[in-house]
Image (tube, rainbow, N blue to C red):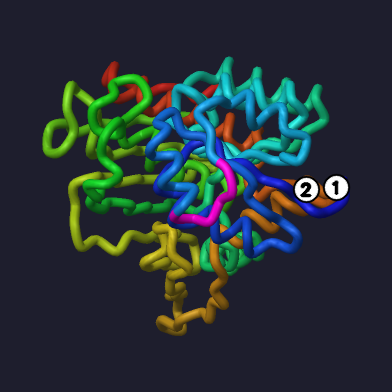
Amino acid sequence: MNSPIGWALIGASNVARQWIVDAIRAQPESQILNVLSSNEERGARFATENGIPAHTADIGTILSDESVDAVYISTANQFHCSQTLAAASAGKNILCEKPVALSVDDARKMITACRDAGVVLGVNHHLRCNAMHQKLRQLLAAGEIGRLNAVRVFHANFLPQALQGWRINDPNGGGLILDSTIHDIDTLRFLIGSNPTHVMAMTQSGRLAHDGVEDGIMVVMRFPGDVLVQIHGSYTVPFSEGGVEFYGSHGVLIGRDCMSQRAAGRLFMRNADGEREIPVHHHNLYHYALAAFSNAVRGTGQPAATGEDGLAALAIALAIRESALTGRQVEVEIP
């Protein structure tokens, strides 16, 4: 298709308000036409506060509107599949929040439906859009630290009150694994360029979450080449900056303050010559993601994270959940 791109928001969410509205409007000839919320009052308030001309509680209103070319889905996780299938059937391009679905079978259905309908499916795994991670990926691919031996990811923070809700009390769609750890998984896939073969995990629950929903996790994963990876994630740790460390045979790459939605992060290399900081030219993560998605809608390139990326991250996250529940090592299977 040619420009312009008309957007509708399916979900009057915090991430839409804080990041996506601005990112869509930063793209050439893109406009937001409508926002859907199951709560009429919330939808009206969201539309007014963000200068969106219409709001609705009926998804059919959006899907029947020929001026809507693309939708951004940021509803609760259990609705992603059905809303994506409906949008694909209506010929709408789809940028879906993570996790892409709650089961691998549903994710596969979504990918197939979008492929059959000839529409773009992207998944909002924003961390791979961080300029620091992109620079780190280049250095790893170039072999700057030799053979990769191990990786450490620390993504522990404190979940703000405004984001709690279903994340800490829904045993099916909530919890740290599908909300936060899945971002770490996607980032690792992006940086290492492969999928883990086996995972083991233990979780915490009860410091903030309810009903057995996990609010802390430690994960160990094995990637091809006998690379061991450790992840620490939490909803209950204030004042942690978050980061990554890659240990190679000839050096170490260290990323600091790079696991958030902000255009931030500092990258260091440590080897026989000492430690030096590697310059990173930052950009807005969501502007980058929406530019890639918009170009894909217009027929050039693909989303920063595709439906297939979303499916792989989900499959690994579900293997981690299985390991935490069963107390055993789980082999990762990605269809």
Residue positioned 18% across, 33% down in the render: 209
- Under tag 2, what secondary structure? helix
> Mark 1 is on which residue type?
Gly
Q: Residue furthest left?
A: 207
Q: Residues within 10 Å of mark 2 (few under 14, many from 20)?
A: many
Residue positioned 37% across, 68% down in the render: 256
Q: Are the residues flagged by discs 2 and 1 in contact, CB closer than 8 Å?
A: yes
**Mark on residue 299?**
1
In the image, is 111 to the left or to the right of 210? Answer: right
Question: x, y percentage for residue 245?
Answer: 40, 60
Question: x, y percentage for residue 128?
Answer: 55, 54
Is residue 53 shown in magenta?
yes
Figure label count = 2
In the rendered view, tell whether residue 198 sits above or below residue 234.
above
Question: Bounds of the magenta span?
Answer: 49-54
- Under tag 1, what secondary structure? loop
Asked whether 8 or 48 is in front, the reply is 48
In the rendered view, tell whether residue 53 sits above or below residue 258.
above
Q: Residues within 10 Å of mark 1 (few under 14, many from 20)?
A: few
Q: Which residue is mark 2?
A: 296
> Could you tell me what secondary structure mostly forms the magenta stretch?
loop
> Mark 2 is on which residue type?
Ala
Question: x, y percentage for residue 68?
Answer: 72, 39
User: Can residue 123 be seen in the rendering of this structure?
Assistant: no
Q: Quadrant of the C terminus?
A: top right
- Report which quarter residue 214 is drawn in: top left
Residue positioned 17% across, 27% down in the render: 210
Asked whether 91 or 290 is in front, the reply is 91
C-alpha distance separating marks 2 and 1: 5 Å
Question: x, y percentage for residue 244?
Answer: 40, 59
